[in-house]
């Protein structure tokens, strides 16, 4: 697994898609998720980051880069160390206070980055290179990972609709690799 925290003891679902059929049905855009591409996408779709257009773009650029990514990921690590769930607002506030103390600007920046993550993706493992970080045991930091494609669907369809149209094939359960 790449880019997600994989639990080899759980059942998994795999979906394969026919990119041509899928793109035609969904009006989707597909691109390599680099920092620049994700900045452009964030300016289009992340309306929760408020301000005038130049202010929004400046705020997005401040948190969508490799330098800031280390700060962003460190908060997830701190949450794990404290046994807290960063996706629960009360836990998140405790972690942010622990990491940034009373630095309101740093907290606001982290929240901007979290808004992008929760809206579009680009999680704490995001590399911004177009490759997904490998989280497999034994993976080396220098490994480039797996080439990633980011998809934006402009016409949302259900998995059932996509499967019936022949755009995807769902493999319901893939057995756990760790018994």
Image (cartoon, rainbow, N blue to C red):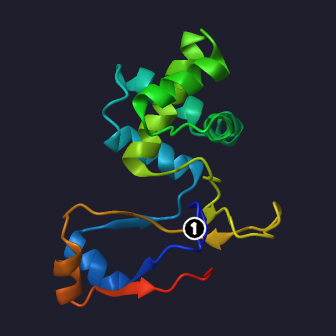
Residue 21, how many percent across, how many down? 27, 85
Residue 11, how many percent across, how many down? 46, 77
Lateral position of residue 88 relative to residue 145, left or right: left
Lateral position of residue 3 relative to residue 66, left or right: left
Quadrant in which the N terminus appears: bottom right
Residue where numbered disc 1 is placed: 7
Residue 30, how many percent across, how many down? 41, 67
Task: Give the image quarter of residue 51.
Answer: top left
- In this rendering, is residue 30 above or below 120? below
- In this rendering, is residue 124 above or below 171? above
Label 1 Cα crowd, 10 Å radius (few <14 / some 14-19 / many 20+) = few
Q: Is residue 58 visible?
A: no
Residue at image position (57%, 39%) is: 64
Residue at image position (60%, 62%) is: 130
Lateral position of residue 51 relative to residue 73, left or right: left
Residue sitting nearer the eye, 94 or 155:
94
Residue sitting nearer the eye, 81 or 68:
81
Task: Give the image quarter of residue 106.
Answer: top right
Lateral position of residue 70 relative to residue 49, left or right: right
Residue at image position (67%, 35%) is: 78
Residue sitting nearer the eye, 57 or 165:
165
């Amino acid at each position: 697994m790449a880019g997600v925290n994989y639990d080899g003891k759980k059942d998994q679902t795999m979906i394969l898609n026919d990119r041509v059929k899928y793109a035609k049905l969904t009006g989707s855009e597909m691109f390599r998720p680099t920092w620049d591409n994700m900045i452009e996408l964030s300016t289009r779709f992340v309306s929760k980051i408020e301000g005038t257009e130049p202010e929004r773009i400046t705020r997005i650029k401040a948190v969508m880069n490799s330098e800031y990514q280390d700060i962003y990921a460190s908060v997830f690590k701190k949450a794990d160390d404290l046994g807290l769930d960063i996706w629960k607002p009360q836990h998140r506030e405790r972690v942010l206070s622990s990491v940034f103390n009373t630095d309101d600007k740093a907290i606001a920046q982290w929240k901007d980055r979290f808004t992008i993550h929760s809206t579009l993706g680009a999680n704490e493992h995001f590399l911004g290179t177009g490759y997904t970080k490998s989280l497999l045991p034994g993976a080396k930091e220098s490994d480039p990972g797996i080439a990633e494609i980011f998809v934006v669907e402009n016409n949302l369809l259900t998995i059932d609709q996509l499967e019936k149209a022949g755009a995807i094939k769902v493999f319901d359960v893939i057995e756990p690799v760790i018994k």
